[in-house]
Amino acid sequence: NKSAIFSITKESSDIDGNIVEVSTGKGFIISTENTVVVDGAQVSENTRKYFVQNESGKFNAEFMSLDKNGVAFLKIGKPLNEKSKLAYTVPVLGDLSKMKVGQKVLILGDSISSFIFNGSKDIKLSINKTNGGSMVLDLDGTVLGIALSSDTNSFASIDSIILSLKAKETPTDTTTSTDTKTP
């Protein structure tokens, strides 16, 4: 899953008004459409620029959406230099409902931490902001969800992430058009 994990940074203004780049945690690729899921508490559509970086290089990223579960999506754009060639593998998605009480769950952030699954799908994690957006995995390496740095939600399951992404990709315009060609 190493190539699927991205460090997320954004442009911000320092105390003197200078533009600086600051960390906004982690994220991971969620689709072959160059979409990265990130901790929604650390991103905003009002930010000037986002950047994502993995072992293949550094790239511009565009804010796509934020959902009610606390996750956001960024779309990877152009590389910042000609050496960067976007490469990643979309991770295998796991199934939280197949987890058994007592199985180990991993959080892959700045370091690797773990906990024992207690059977509750309402997982409560205690992570710092730098690990917001970390991949939550089972021991087989399949993704169960994302770690969030929010006080209210600390975990979003892969199922809720996929549903949110599909809702983003589904057009919301429900008007119908009729073809009124004149003979």
Image (cartoon, rainbow, N blue to C red):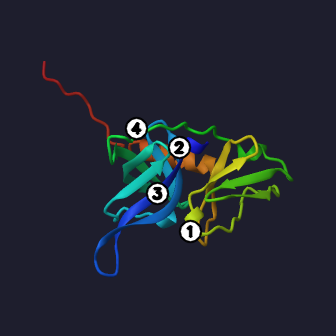
Q: Amino acid type of disc 2?
A: Ile
Q: Amino acid type of disc 3?
A: Ile
Q: Amino acid type of disc 1?
A: Lys
Residue shown at 49%/47% (left/top)?
54
Nearer to the camera, 172 or 132: 132
* Direction from residue 2 to residue 119 in the image, left or right: right
Name the residue at the top extreme: 183
Q: Amino acid type of disc 4?
A: Lys
Which is more N-terminal, label 4 or label 3? 3
Give residue 152's mark: none
Quadrant hosting residue 149: bottom right
Which is more N-terminal, label 4 or label 1? 4
Return the residue at label 3. Answer: 8
> What is the crowding at mark 2: few (fewer than 14 residues within 10 Å), some, or many (at least 20)?
many
Which is more N-terminal, label 1 or label 3? 3
Q: Nearer the viewer, mark 3 or mark 2?
A: 3
Return the residue at label 1. Answer: 129
> What is the crowding at mark 1: few (fewer than 14 residues within 10 Å), some, or many (at least 20)?
some
Which is more N-terminal, label 2 or label 3? 3
Secondary structure state at the residue bearing disc 4: loop
Return the residue at label 4. Answer: 85
> What is the crowding at mark 4: few (fewer than 14 residues within 10 Å), some, or many (at least 20)?
some
Question: x, y (%) of residue 132?
Answer: 57, 62
The alpha-carbon separation of the residues under discs 3 and 1 comes to: 12 Å
The quadrant in which the N terminus is found is top right
Question: x, y (%) of residue 98?
Answer: 77, 43
The alpha-carbon separation of the residues under discs 3 and 2 comes to: 15 Å
